[in-house]
Amino acid sequence: TAIALFSTGLFAQTQNNDLRDRIFFLTHTPTVQQFQEVATVIRTIADIREVSTDNDQKSVAVRATAGQIDIAEWLFNELDTQTVQASVPHEYRVPGGGDDVIRLFYLTQTATVQDFQEVAAAVRTITNITRVFTYNAPKALVVRDTAERIQMAEWLVKELEQPASPSPHEYRVPGPNDDVVRVMFLAKTGSVQA
């Protein structure tokens, strides 16, 4: 029994030695809500369990593996900025993650936070990507999934960001199936409720 306990303790200690501590200080998030949204994106997209925040210092402290910290640092640098470059692709391919991709979209045509949240809900639902998170102030949509699903999300975001069009637009999902995504703009509904 003593050997088993010692071995388990040694395994846990070895795993904890692989963890590193890092603190990020946000400088371009003026409100507590914005700061908390960035912290949530870092926590969930980087899959970090040990995250603590300090609202007064606007700091996010993480304890994670080197790979998770690399993702957190990329997200931090992308989200804590004064200038948003919406037209530039913001993508991170997870090293050793195979087809694991993180993509950041800045939506420029959504007029309100509600519109932005509705686009995020549509992307999450249509693409079947479970890790879709938002940072409301700059209208940043962060998604993590396979390259194929990220490609579909990119198409959908572009479609929903453009003015209404009378003709439907279509996306054929790559692969052996015959899945199709189609965006149709309804011209004769007089109100949102209709």
Image (cartoon, rainbow, N blue to C red):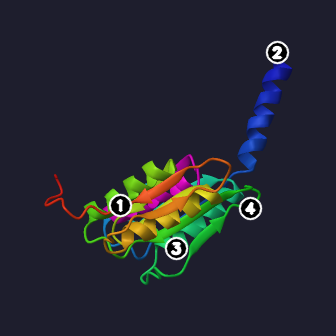
Frontmost residue, 149 versus 116: 149
Q: Quadrant of residue 185?
A: bottom left
Task: Check if residue 48 falls in the magenta segment.
Answer: yes
Image position, residue 39 (x, y; %): 45, 59
Characterize the local packing of mark 1: few (<14), some (14-19) or many (20 or more) Cα atoms within 10 angstroms. Answer: some
Instruction: Examine the residues drawn in magenta and state their main secondary structure.
Output: helix
Residue at the spot of label 4: 95
Does 146 appear above or below 103?
Answer: above
In terms of sequence position, does the residue under pointer 4 or pointer 3 come before the other? 3
Frontmost residue, 192 versus 176: 176
Q: Is residue 40 visible?
A: no
In whole angstroms, how far apart are the C-alphas of marks 1 and 2? Answer: 66 Å
Q: Quadrant of the N terminus?
A: top right
In terms of sequence position, does the residue under pointer 1 or pointer 2 come before the other? 2
Characterize the local packing of mark 2: few (<14), some (14-19) or many (20 or more) Cα atoms within 10 angstroms. Answer: few
Residue at the spot of label 2: 1
Q: Which residues are magenta?
A: 32-51
Tell me the number on the disc at residue 78: 3
| Mark 3 residue element | helix
Frontmost residue, 38 versus 147: 147
